[in-house]
Amino acid sequence: MCAVEFVQNEEQIVGANIVIGTKAPVRAMVEAITHASTVLINETQTESLALPSASFTTDKASVVVVGADDATVDTLVANKSMYSAYANVLTESGVSAGFDGVISTPAAATAADGAPSVVVGGKAANKISPDNLTAPCTHLAFFEKGGKKGAIATEEAVAKIVAIAGESKADLAATLVKNAKCSVVTSSSDVGSIA
């Protein structure tokens, strides 16, 4: 349905081609773009860490949820706390959105801003207007359905990031999470309880 082919020059990833079949759902296209963009950013930007994730802000926190499922995205949209769905770029200066839109349920989208942009097949496409940069991440959560919910050590969080982004991001990951709470969440309600 979808394929990502990375383009290399002198053993460096310099681009990506995305092939999408006519029967592929839009969500598959989003995942392909997320994969391509996070790999490219991680390969070319030494001071940036791109993760497949959703993010939200509260009065007290800047939260990134790695691997957030669609139910979590729907909850964040309905709660009007969504900063970015699908991908985020973390730096020492803050979190930058990878996307300025979201695919959610029509009910969640309507709750968020009153009018979804497009509704097809029970899903609504909506624009989100995140700031260019929000506060540095204060809570990094890893969404693991069926996992063990709770706080994790910084070292475990770094290992999880390295498994996603590669060994070259280990030192940056350690720097970015040293002052953040780190946890595993297993449902959208777990994410809703983070403040």
Image (cartoon, rainbow, N blue to C red):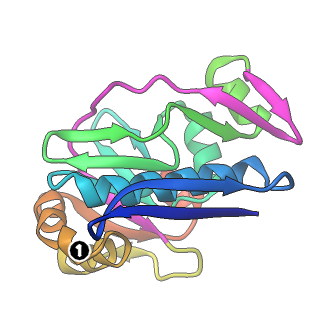
Inspect this view and state whether residue 137 appears.
no
26 inside magenta stretch: no
Residue 142, position as x, y percentages in the image = 42, 67
Q: Is residue 113 left or right of residue 99?
A: right
Q: Which residues are magenta?
A: 116-143
User: Which residue: 72% across, 25% down?
Assistant: 110
Q: Is residue 119 left or right of residue 40?
A: right
Q: In this rendering, is residue 59 above or below 28?
A: above
Residue 26, position as x, y percentages in the image = 74, 47
User: Which residue: 89% across, 42% down?
Assistant: 121
Q: Residue furthest front?
A: 10
Q: Is residue 119 left or right of residue 136?
A: right
What amino acid does circle 1 point to? Val
User: Which residue: 16% across, 56% down?
Assistant: 46
Q: Is residue 159 left or right of residue 187?
A: left
Mark 1 lies on residue: 158
